[in-house]
Every structure is written in structure tokens, then in C-alpha cells.
Image (tube, rainbow, N blue to C red):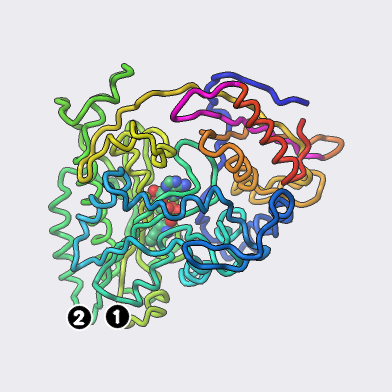
Amino acid sequence: MPSVKHNDMPPTTLMRRISFSRYPSPPPPSVSGPPLRLRLRPLQLTLRRFNSSSATPTTISLLGRTYPTDGWTNITPSITAHLSQNLHLQPSHPISITRSLIESRFPSPTYTHHNHLSPIVTTAQNFDSLGFPSDHPGRARSDTYYINAGHVLRTHTSAHQLDLFKANHAPGFLVSADVYRRDAIDRSHYPVFHQMEGARGWDLAKTSVAEINDETEYLASLTASLQVEDLHPPFHEQTNPLQPQHSSEAAAAVAAHLKRSLESVVLALFTSAPNPDADADADSPSSSSSSSSSSTPAPPLKVRWVEAYFPFTSPSWELEVFWRGSWLELLGCGIVQHPILTAANLPSSHISWAFGVGLERIAMVLFGIPDIRLFWSTDDRFTAQFIQGEVTRFIEFSKFPGTLRDIAFWLPGGVEDGEDTGGANSGAGGPAVHENDIMEIIRNVGGDLVEDVLLKDQFTHPKTKRASRCYRVHYRSLERTLTSEEVNAKHAELEKALKEALGVEIR
Ligand code: FA5
Ligand code: MG
């Protein structure tokens, strides 16, 4: 049956955007049985994809090294094409401007800066060194790009923590880098993005808590104009525990230093941006073209601290900023798990904080860039707009119309889809398909022409028990108007690819 076609209809908010947290909190000890087990099942269907249309070569050469492939290999040419682009190092690129602005708040010699670390890391670096349990969902092939069983494209800059703590060049470090995740497709999610990791440590045998507090007081004096909501105590026995190796005084001092450091960065960044609210209130199409010369005074900037969970920090938090009417998560952070510092041969009296911030998230807000795909544009109407060292408001060169196409199919087995079901919707039985496998195929066929994908509906046939899914694919080019012939051809190609790779039956 042909798919339903729609033209230029905005996606509705009733439809679920496909995403889930990478760091689900561990289950309470009373829960028996492995959590999220179904999501970790080996994905035979994915293997079939690689063995059918294009057989996996026995080796892959990446960044000058050759790696043997195996049953874990799932990287695709559309991903490896991004490997040497290094947007964080391209002069006058918004990602690089954002990186430099943050770096300037963490100067050397207190912090060493590392911007050229290879994106190919071992599973030991990306996961084991950080205390990820062996069944952590972040390790699944559905979430991470594997070169082979032992090597991945780093999913976060935290992959370099242990090595940099070991090198111990300075009290602190910063790492900026490209990171890779198999994920949903929409205007704020792309499989490649950039993070900056920061860390700062003290040997409490050499530095007193009072000295840390003095530095914190200075940082606090820089952020007096910021409105900060921090409702939680520094640690909580159940939800955000103090580590057994830390005294509450030392951990509270390090937590306060971490929070004030990051607040001062956010304030510096957001006050360097042209006042967005001067034009956010205006609905005229030219509103995005105003510059920093706006005369409307900016309202005080508001941020809030939210408790979080990461396997490698405790206690942990996320920092959110109130921006254009909603809270936006900027970063995750916390006090580094003591065993990581011990593994780095640091003395037991050492304590450290760490954070990881998304550079696209910040750059989109600072520059007013509405779509994450734009960062990859080589169109000079985009690239020529920016100047190293300056935050300027992005001037939209043109918004080309989009087109929606639905694709509905019966699954051979079921879909595993993240925290809402906690695992497979196994339908008529048979191997489960992870939603990210569907996204990957859409991305491979549609490339940057796919703006987002929404799950429109799902049901299980009451008699046959087969599971049905309908996704709405939003095709839109940032650079030109797509013809319906071209979109139809892409969509037909997508149907074929889904059939071949996953064995679905188009409805
Ligand atoms: C992490 O990656 C942790 N490694 C952060 C961390 C470092 C915690 C050190 C503690 C200590 P998370 O997955 O939340 O956490 O990502 C961190 C930030 O990266 C997010 O807050 C967000 O700004 C950005 N980010 C995450 N996923 C995406 C995405 N798909 N697209 C763009 N930015 C993203
Ligand atoms: Mg997060």
C-alpha cells in the first residue's frame, strides 16, 4: 500500500519525538533482574543490513589507522565523512567561537586545553574507565557507533577523563571535540555534535578547604547579576549521594566552586550575545536580522541546578538556562568518582569536579541558529556571516518549504524504544528492532534533507499480534526548494531500504 502523503503540514505536538536519556539512574537495589535488558539484545536485523546491500569489509581505515571489523561494526560512510571536519577548530565557525569564549573563562596555566584528541577511542576509555556497568544501555550498538568490539567513536568527551587525570599536567583541563551518537532526528539532534569537558582538582593534603572557598567567593562576585535557582542541598543520601571518601565540608566546597565556575561562564556567554529578547517579542520575519545594537534592556538571566545521575560523578547536576520561555539543558557535571582518580594514580587526598557541555546547544542559542544541520553547511550565506571572537545574530538567508511523508509498516518482530516501555514491544515475536536502527536508515537514505522524524502512531494487531508503526518524515533542505519528484524518489528509496535492512512490510 502506498504511504500517505501530506504537504507542508507542521508536525503536531501530539506526536512523540524519539529520544531518551543516555544516563538512566540505576534501579533501586530492591529491583531484581537486569534493567533494560531487552534493549541490549544483539540486533541481528542490523547485521543483516550490513551484510545485504553493502557487505562489511574485513577492515576499515580511519584517520590513518586500519581496524579489523567484526559483528559489532555499525559505522556508516555518512558518519565517517564527518570525522576530520573539526568544526570546533574552524576559524570563524560558531562552534569554534563558542569554544574560544568558554576557554577564555578557564585560562592556562590552571587549565590545559586539548582540542586535537582522536575521536576513535577504546570501549575501555569511553565506558569502563568511567565505571559504566557492563549492561549499561549506552554501550548498546543501537546507541553507539562501533568500529569493532573494542573501538567506538567517542560518545562524550568524558572518554578522555582518565587519561588526562593520569597525565596530571595542571590542576585542571579542558577538552573540546566532536562526539558521535546514534540518536533521534530533529532540529536539535544530529548524530555528530561537539562537547567541551572541563575538570579541576585539588590535593586536600596541600590545599585547604578555605582556599577553595576563597576562589569560589571571587567567582560568586562575578555572577551577582545572575538569578540562580538551586533548591537541592549539595548532596542527598538517596538521590545524590556524597562519596564515602569525601568529607561533607570538602565536597560542599568543591560543589560550590564547580557551580560558581559554570555560572560565571554562562553569564559571560549570554551577556556577550546580542539581546535576543529585543527581537523575540517581535513576530515580524525580519526579527532575526537585528544586531547587538538593540536598545531594549535584557531581563536578568535565569539559570537553575537540577539533580542528575552519571556513572562517573556523585553528586551530579545539570545546569539549565531559561531561554525564550523554556528551560534548556546546557550541561552535566558533578564531583568525580574517587575510583577514577585512584586509577589515575592521584593521591587519596585528591578531589575533583568535572563538567561536559554541548557546544551546539549553546551556539544555537547565542547566535540564534534555528537548526543544528546548519552548522555543517558549506553555503557561504552561512559561513561568511561569522567572525572569530564575536557573537552575532544569525541572519536567516531563506527558509525553504518542507514536505511531510508518512511511512507505515508492520515490524517483523517489535521495536525496542527506550524508557517509556523499558524494552521491546515484541509484537508477533521475532527479533526486536531498535528505533535508532530505523533512524539510522532514514539518515543514510535522506541525509541532511531529513529535518525530523516523528512517531505518528503505533498499535498491535489484536489477532495477528503484529506490531505496526507509522513515522512522519519531514523533508526540508536548508539550501533549496525540493521538488515533489525528488522527495517521492527519496521516500521510495527509504521504503526499499527499510524492507531490505529490517524486513518490515510496508502497509
Ligand atoms: C554527558 O555527555 C556527560 N559526559 C557530561 C558530564 C561530563 C557529566 C562530566 C558529568 C561530568 P549528556 O549526555 O547529558 O552528558 O550530554 C552533555 C551535554 O551535551 C548536554 O547537556 C547537551 O548540552 C549536549 N548534548 C547531549 N546530547 C546532544 C545532542 N544529541 N545534540 C546536541 N547536544 C547534545
Ligand atoms: Mg543530559
Instruction: Judge left or right: residue 257 versus residue 462.
Output: left
Query: Please, what is the three-letter code of the amino acid marked with disc 1?
Result: Ser
Q: Do the residues labelled 1 and 2 touch (CB within 8 Å)?
A: yes
- Residue 477 covered by magenta stretch: yes
Viewer-closest of 290 and 469: 290
The part of the chain drawn in magenta is: 466-484
Q: For the residue labelled by badge 1, is the local secondary structure a helix, a strand or a loop?
A: loop
Residue 76: percent from left, percent from top: 58, 52
Say if the magenta span includes residue 344: no
* Residue at image location 41% in from the left, 63% down from the top: 158
Whole-percent x, y for residue 500 in the image: 75, 43
Residue receiving disc 1: 349
203 over 97 or under it: above or below: below
| Secondary structure of residue under mark 2 | loop
Mark 1 → mark 2, Cα distance in angstroms = 9 Å
Q: Can residue 33 be seen in this view?
A: no
Number of numbered discs overlaid on the protein picture:
2
Q: Where residue 157 appears, x then y in whole percent?
A: 40, 60
Residue identified by numbered label 2: 206
Q: What residue type is labelled 2?
A: Lys
Above-or-below relation of 115 to 231: below
Query: Which corner quadrant of the image does residue 94 belong to?
Result: top left
